[in-house]
């Protein structure tokens, strides 16, 4: 299974970006997909998660600004990021729990850089 992210870049404070993550390979079902981020010198943290049942959860720091959504037909998850702030600068990683056969495996994307200038 491969996760391919796109949509990162440089944006001014107050701007918006939309990240995409497409999963491909031997996928029976995606149990959950989410986004994490890691800023320099900091631990990787959960940003948002979307479950197969449509449930969502967000880090407190992004609630009301970010929105996660998915396209099950395309095995793709999106992260719409609005009102971006310099503290949102980080490498954003896609993560997925994939049911393959009778086991669940966890996968990471390669990461996409988001830089917010003040």
Image (cartoon, rainbow, N blue to C red):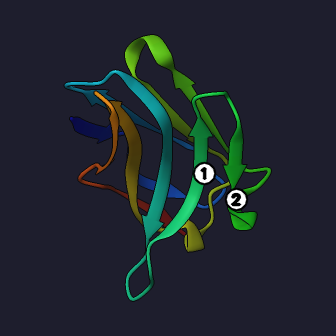
The relative height of residue 29 versus residue 5 in the rendered view (above or below) is: above
Secondary structure of the residue carrying numbered label 1: strand
The residue under label 2 is 62
Farthest residue toward the front? 102
Horizontally, residue 63 falls left or right of residue 100, namely right
Q: Give 65 or 117, whichever is nearer the viewer.
A: 65
The relative height of residue 95 versus residue 103 in the rendered view (above or below) is: below
Which labelled disc corresponds to residue 104?
A: none
Secondary structure of the residue carrying numbered label 2: helix
Horizontally, residue 52 falls left or right of residue 90, namely right
Contact, CB < 8 Å: mark 2 with mark 1? yes
Q: Residues within 10 Å of mark 2 (few under 14, many from 20)?
A: some
Tell me the residue at 65%/27% (across/down). Answer: 53
Farthest residue toward the top? 73
Q: Position of residue 28 (x, y in %)?
A: 34, 21
> Is residue 21 in view from this perspective?
yes
> Could you say which quadrant of the image residue 102 lies in?
top left
Q: Earlier in the sequence, mark 2 or mark 1?
A: 1
Tell me the residue at 60%/39% (across/down). Answer: 50
Label 2 to label 1: alpha-carbon separation: 8 Å
The relative height of residue 15 versus residue 78 in the rendered view (above or below) is: below
Q: Position of residue 105 (x, y in %)?
A: 31, 45
Q: Residues within 10 Å of mark 1 (few under 14, many from 20)?
A: many
The residue under label 1 is 48
Q: Give 27 or 89, whichever is nearer the viewer.
A: 27
The relative height of residue 116 versus residue 40 in the rendered view (above or below) is: above
Farthest residue toward the right? 64
Q: Position of residue 116 (x, y in %)?
A: 50, 64
Q: Quadrant of the C terminus?
A: bottom right
- In the image, which is nearer the foreground, mark 2 or mark 1? 1
Tell me the residue at 48%/40% (across/down). Answer: 33
Q: Position of residue 114 (x, y in %)?
A: 42, 58
């Amino acid at each position: 299974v491969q996760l391919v992210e796109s949509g990162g870049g440089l944006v001014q404070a107050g701007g918006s970006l939309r990240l995409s993550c497409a999963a491909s390979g031997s996928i029976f079902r995606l149990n959950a997909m989410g986004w994490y981020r890691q800023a320099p010198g900091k631990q990787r943290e959960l940003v948002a998660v979307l479950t197969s049942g449509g449930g969502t959860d967000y880090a407190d720091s992004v609630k009301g600004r970010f929105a996660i959504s998915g396209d099950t037909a395309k095995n793709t998850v999106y992260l719409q990021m609005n009102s971006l702030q310099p503290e949102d600068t980080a490498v954003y990683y896609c993560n997925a729990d994939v049911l393959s056969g009778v086991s669940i495996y966890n996968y990471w994307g390669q990461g996409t850089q988001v830089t917010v200038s003040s």
